[in-house]
Image (cartoon, rainbow, N blue to C red):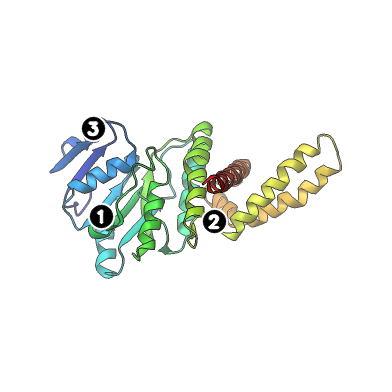
Amino acid sequence: MQLSPPPAEVILASDGKTVSIAEVEDTIGLIQLATEVQSGPAVARNLGAEHASGAILCFIDSDVIAPTGLVAQIRQVFMDNPEVDALFGSYDDAPFIPTFLSQYRNLLHHYVHQKGREEAFTFWSGCGAIRREAFFKAGGFDGSRFPHPSIEDIELGYRLKRAGYSMRLCKDIQVKHLKKWGAYSMIKTDFLYRALPWTELLLNEKGFTNDLNIKVSDRLSVVAVFLLIPLLFGSLWVSNIGFLSIPVFFAFLILNVDLYQFFYQQKGWWFTLRVIPWHITFYLISGLAFALGTTKYYLKNIRS
């Protein structure tokens, strides 16, 4: 999709070898770069930033479609708010891939960002922009710490905030996600590349918080899930235990009623009902990763 007005320059940074994409080869002034050795998106983004000449660096993931007016929106925010050093948006509410898990996952992302605080403590590179000076003073993305797609953008956001820079979540800046999610890829990503490193980051960055994903309701939801699972399994042997799972389950639903109302408005009852077991799985994975990450963190400190 053509952006209007167009950006000052377009840099395609590939993680690995240079790619040939017909849709972008005709872009005027396109600069194609490659890391040559697959090193992760953090290294690729840093490479692109090093070759950029603009005062504002805008990062767009390869699996999103930007709206026509994206450049104008970003410029306007920075012009109207000189105190803002970085901004980011969210996925829109009309995911491209029609499969259930892809719709669920991308709509969940949209909901979380739309409900987040505008004064942000994290950054998102799916569609985010940073003043060039702030980006390089903060040290850019940490490619050595994150050699795979992970929370490299969130960690950069923590460093920006710690250095005193201002970040803003702009809810009206939205892009369309093209990624197809499957059960295995979703669980693996949530556990290995999101929850585990995020736990480590939160423990190391005392005094900071994950303003998008760790609210009181999220913590209580994890507790509810960790009560619900053993109660359900226990009911296989002790029938009376099963009744105890009913109030716990309803408590979980109440904690997440706003989210389920959102899914209902977007996709109807049947879709929303299918969301619930996957949402329980999400909190189960998050809780297990937090427990494992916390244990590793304190064992590491004891040994050192």
Residue 230 x, y percent position in the rendering: 74, 41
Residue 51 against residue 122 in the figure, above or below = above
Query: Which residue is at the front of the view, 94 or 130?
Result: 130
Residue 107 x, y percent position in the rendering: 48, 47
Instruction: Determine the residue positioned at 50% across, 38% down.
Output: 192
Instruction: Determine the residue positioned at 16% across, 41% down.
Output: 30
Instruction: Determine the residue positioned at 37% across, 38% down.
Output: 147
At label 1, counting other C-alpha atoms closer than 10 Å, the crowd grade (few under 14, some 14-19, many 20 or more) is: some
Give me the C-alpha separation between circle 2 and circle 3: 39 Å
Residue 198 against residue 72 in the figure, above or below = above
Give me the C-alpha separation between circle 1 and circle 3: 29 Å
Which is closer to the viewer, label 2 or label 1? 1
Residue 102 against residue 57 in the figure, above or below = above
Residue 214: numbered disc:
2
Q: Secondary structure at mark 3?
A: loop
Decide if residue 278 is on the left or right side of residue 134. right
Give the residue pinned by disc 3.
21
Q: Quadrant of the N terminus?
A: top left
Query: Which residue is at the front of the view, 26 or 301?
Result: 301
Q: Amino acid at mark 2?
A: Ile
Q: Amino acid at mark 3?
A: Ile
Q: Secondary structure at mark 1?
A: helix
Which is closer to the viewer, label 1 or label 3? 1
Of the numbered discs 1 and 3, the one sitting upstream in the chain is 3
Give me the C-alpha separation between circle 2 and circle 1: 28 Å
> Is residue 8 visible to us here?
yes
Give the residue pinned by disc 1.
136
Q: Amino acid at mark 1?
A: Phe
